[in-house]
Amino acid sequence: MKRVLNRINSSSKKILSIINKHKKKLIIGLCAFIMLFISSFLYINLTNPTKINRYIAHVINKGNPANNAFEDENFYNAIVDAYNTQNKTSLPYTTNLTDEQLKKITSLTAYRKKIFSIKGVEKIEKLTLLSLVDNKLIDVDISNNLNLTSLDLSKNAIDYINLSKNVKLERVNLASNYLEELDISSLNKLKIINLT
């Protein structure tokens, strides 16, 4: 046991001697490592759609979306996510998506994202699927989204929606809203509808 303790003590002294001898190099190396780590951390979170980037976008844009055609930050973040998924990119939430980029989005799904407005959705002209389940929507205008074939806005607070121009709709789910009436007379391709 005494031999083991002597070896440990001897090894500790050697390590301390090496540390003292190379103190400046160790400090410089540690500082370089910390700077590299911070630089990598900042690069990743400024150029990719991470939770930290979402917060950065929120602060920079003062709670507004990067694209001023939209008014709901959570809705815009869902749009950026949809664009990234469908185009195999990783644009950050601070990106102001162009009209050309918005036209590339064909489906948009956002479940429980506290979305209160979809103003600007008309810019997503090729949208065929829109699913915004369990959000905070009251007023919804999708009259310019003429390519929609599937619509799920269930579990919101919608009391009126005009679907007369959305003649390509095949599936509609508006369950758990406050709708009193809904005109579906122009929806000749409708196969499934849920209003309960």
Image (spheres, rainbow, N blue to C red):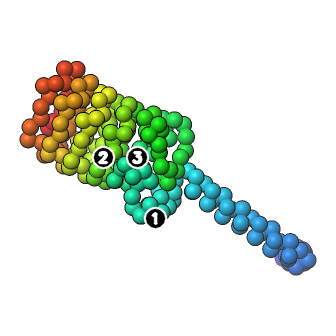
Confirm or deny contact between disc 1 and disc 3 (CB under 8 A): no
Percent coordinates x, y for residue 82 in the rendering: 44, 40
Closer to the N terminus: mark 2 or mark 3?
A: 3
**Quadrant of residue 34 within the rendered picture:** bottom right
Is residue 159 visible in this depiction of the protein? yes
Percent coordinates x, y for residue 1 in the rendering: 83, 74
Compared with residue 186, is residue 86 higher up or lower down, i.e. above or below? below
The residue located at (74%, 64%) in the rendering is 33
Percent coordinates x, y for residue 5 in the rendering: 84, 76
Reading the image, the residue beneath label 1 is: 59
Helix, strand or loop for disc 1: helix
Mark 1 → mark 2, Cα distance in angstroms: 21 Å
Closer to the N terminus: mark 1 or mark 3?
A: 1
Confirm or deny contact between disc 1 and disc 2 (CB under 8 A): no
Reading the image, the residue beneath label 3 is: 78
| Relative to 33, 150 lies left or right | left
Around disc 1, counting alpha carbons within 10 Å, would you say few (fewer than 14), some (14 to 19), or many (20 or more)?
A: few
Give the residue type that dot 2 points to: Ile
**Quadrant of residue 163 within the rendered picture:** top left
Helix, strand or loop for disc 3: helix
| Relative to 179, 38 lies left or right | right
Helix, strand or loop for disc 2: loop
Mark 2 → mark 3, Cα distance in angstroms: 11 Å
- Nearest-to-viewer mark from 2 and 3: 2
The residue located at (19%, 24%) in the rendering is 187
Closer to the N terminus: mark 1 or mark 2?
A: 1
Q: Which label number is shown at residue 25?
A: none
Around disc 2, counting alpha carbons within 10 Å, would you say few (fewer than 14), some (14 to 19), or many (20 or more)?
A: many
Around disc 3, counting alpha carbons within 10 Å, would you say few (fewer than 14), some (14 to 19), or many (20 or more)?
A: some
Q: Nearer the viewer, residue 5 or 108?
A: 108
Q: Which label number is shown at residue 118?
A: 2
